[in-house]
Amino acid sequence: MTKHRWKWVAGLSLLLITFVAITVTQPSSWKPLISAQFPGGEWVDGETLSGWMEGASPEILVLLDVRTPEEYAMSHLRGAQPVDPSNPNVEGLSIPADATVVVYCSIGYRSAAIVEELKDAGIDDVYNLEGGLFDWANRDRPVYRGDKRVREVHPFNRWWGLLLKRERRARTSGDDR
């Protein structure tokens, strides 16, 4: 291959790597992959959910956090109910018939599975938070530990934590960063 072609291939490779790196480091960019596996789920963006939480609509809003207890304890959306992602007990949730339900996790994968289960259980007005808690926090929307507003979000693990802005990424036990 000529020197000129090597430059072209190297430049194209660098462009492709940059595109992939930027794309996969945005929590909301995982939506197409998640939707492919869970095609029946509906999504709500953070701006819309923020309006709902401020009382713009709907009348009854139920927030379900489907992360681990450790993740939930670090921070969550105000008023969110924790739900065990490995054993969600959808039938045991007390959700009013006229409620709008928003389910979230770190980026939207675990919550997509729960949205599907809730729909199968007959709950129709249910949404997955686009980009999950990572995107929510990265856009400087409020997260809480109990009633106290905090900045940190549990990173799930070292690699998924790269989807969080550094200042939002909580240090966890066993973290070697």
Image (cartoon, rainbow, N blue to C red):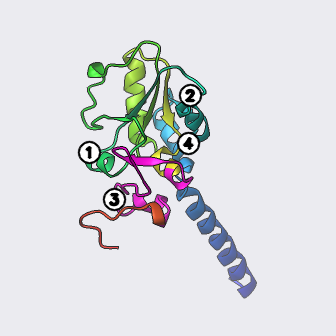
SS label for mark 1? helix
Proximity of marks 2 and 4: CB atoms separated by less than 8 Å: no
Magenta segment:
137-166
Query: Which residue is disc 2 drawn over?
Result: 55
Q: Nearer the viewer, mark 2 or mark 1?
A: 2
Residue 50 picture location, percent across and down: 56, 38
Amino acid type at circle 3 is Asn
Along the polypeptide, which appears first: circle 1 or circle 4? 4
Along the polypeptide, which appears first: circle 1 or circle 3? 1
Q: Nearer the viewer, residue 64 or 111?
A: 64
User: Which dot marks residue 69?
Assistant: 1
Query: Which residue is disc 4 drawn over?
Result: 32
Amino acid type at circle 2 is Gly
Q: Label 2 to label 4, Cα distance in Å?
A: 29 Å
Which quadrant: the C terminus? bottom left
Residue 171 picture location, percent across and down: 33, 65
Q: Residue 46: which quarter of the image?
A: top right
User: Which dot marks residue 157?
Assistant: 3
Along the polypeptide, which appears first: circle 3 or circle 4? 4
Q: Nearer the viewer, mark 1 or mark 3?
A: 1
Amino acid type at circle 1 is Pro
Amino acid type at circle 4 is Pro
Indicate whether residue 155 is drawn in magenta: yes
Q: Is residue 146 left or right of residue 43?
A: left
